[in-house]
Amino acid sequence: MRAEAQARVRAVVGEPPPELDALAATAGGSFFHSAAWLRAVARAAPEYEPYVLVGETGRITAACPLLRRRRWGTSWFYGGAWGTYGGIVSVDADAAAAVHERLLRLARDPRVPCIRVHDFAGSLPDAPAWRRVAESCHVLDLPADASALWDGAFTSQNRNKIRKAEKLGVVVRRARDAAAFASYAALYDESVQRWGAGRAVPPALFDALAGAHPGVDVWLAEHEGEVVAALLNFTCGGQVMNWGNVSRRAAWNLSPNNLLHWRALQSACAEATGPRLYNFGSSAGLPGVETFKSAFGAREHIYMRREAGPAWVARLQRRRGGSCPRTVASRPACRALQARLRVNRYRLVGQPALNVRGQVGRPRVSLGWRFGHCLGTNGVEWGGDRWLDRAGARGFALDDLVQRLGCRFALVRGLAREQIK
C-alpha cells in the first residue's frame, strides 16, 4: 500500500499549524522548520508565503515547511532561504514518506518551476526527480563541559585571541530585546557593504525575530560601551545555528569574534538538555572563514541541496546563458576557457557583462553565497550570489585575464570534491 494511502497529506497555507513547533524541536529539526521562522520571513518579505505540507495519522506527525513565491502564474518553493535549511521533520516514518511523495507530485506540476530544499539532516530520500548539489558548513560537537573544547579542540592561536579580547576589555552579553536586534542590524548593514553582497536580507527580518522564539539570541561584544561585534544564534531541534557573525572592521584587532563564539559555546555546553551540535554555517568557499571556524575544532559537514522541477526550466536557463546544476560549464566557450586556465576547482559560467562588472565598473569574481551558481540573467535569480573584489579571486588577476582572453566570464568556485556533470 502506498504511504500516502496510510497518511493523509494536506497543504497549510499562510499561518503555520501549531504542531509544527513540536516537530521542529525534534533531533532532525531546526529553528528554520519552526512557525516562528516562517512568520518572521513572511513579515519581512511579504512576497514569501508560508506553505507547509503536513502528514496526519490522526494528528500531524510529519511536516515539510516551505516558502512559496508566486510570479507570473507560477509558484516557486524554497525549503530554506537566506542561508537556512529545510526538509521533512517527523515522528512517524509513514507520514514522512507520504509528505515526500506529495512533494514530488508538486514538483511535477508545470506551474512549479522549482522546488529547492537545503536538506541539512538528510530527510529527503533519493528519487530520480531530485537534482543534487553538494553544499557544506562547519559544525562542532558540544561536550557537557566546555573546558574540553578549550583544552582539546581550540588551537593555541584561538585561545590567545580569546585571552587578548578579555584583557583588552571586550565584554560579551546575550540579549533578546529589540535594542539588541537593532544593534545587530546596524552591524549587519555595515558588514554587508564590506562584503559586497549582491543582496542583503530585508532589515525588517531582525525586527520580526525580536521576541519571536525563546531560542533566538543576539550575542553582543562591547568595548568601552560600544557594540563592536555580534552573533545571531538560533537554538532549536538538533542544533545551535550561528546564522551570522557581524563585526566592525576597526575592532578586529580586539578579536571580539573569537570571544563571542567562546561565550556562546560555553552557554550551549551548559544546557544539559539542549542541542549537542553548534553550527557555524557556510563559509562560502572563503579560506579565511574556514580557518577561523577550524580554530574552534569545527569539522566540515556535507549535505545536499535538492532541486526539482519540469524540464523546461533547465532548457530556459541554458538558453539564457546561465546554467542549471546539471549543466555547469556546458557551453563550448566555457569548456575552452576552463582548459586554457587549467583549473578544475572553478566553475566557468558565461555571464552577461552586468554580472561580471561590479557597480564600480571593474570585473569581479563571484563566489556563490552558499556555493550557489550564477543562474539567470541577473545572477541572483536562483543562487543569490555574493560578489567579491578581485582580491578574493584566489590569485586570479581578473582584469588581466579578461583583457588577455578578450572575454567576460564569472568564475564561480564549486566544491572541490563535487563532480561536474
Image (cartoon, grey):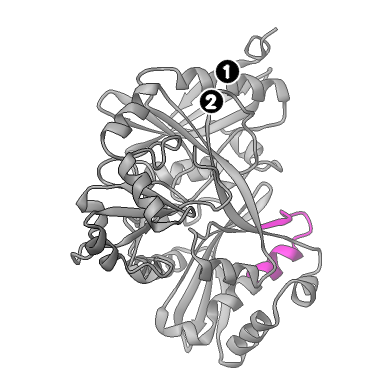
Quarter of the figure with the N terminus: top right
Q: Is residue 66 left or right of residue 191?
A: right
What type is the residue that disc 1 sits on? Val
Residue 266 among magenta residues: yes
Q: Earlier in the sequence, mark 2 or mark 1?
A: 1
Give the mark count.
2
The answer to whether the residues at label 2 and label 1 have Cβ atoms under 8 Å apart is yes
Nearer-the-camera pick, 382 or 262: 382
Does residue 190 belong to the magenta stretch?
no
Report x, y in % for residue 154: 71, 75
Dot 2: element:
strand
Q: Secondary structure at mark 1?
A: strand
Q: Residue at x 61, y 71 (%)?
A: 261
> Pointer 2: what residue?
53
Mark pair 2, 1: CA separation: 7 Å
- Residue in front for this viewpoint, 92 or 193: 193
* Residue bearing the label numbered 1: 9
> Could you tell me residue 33's position as x and y percent?
56, 40
Q: Residues within 10 Å of mark 2 (few under 14, many from 20)?
A: many
Crowding at mark 1 (Cα within 10 Å: few <14, some 14-19, many 20+): many
* Quadrant position of residue 14: top left
Q: Residue at x 18, y 64 (%)?
A: 361
Residue 184 as seen in the image, left or right of residue 143? left
Magenta residues (range): 263-278
Residue at point 39% right, 58% down? 341
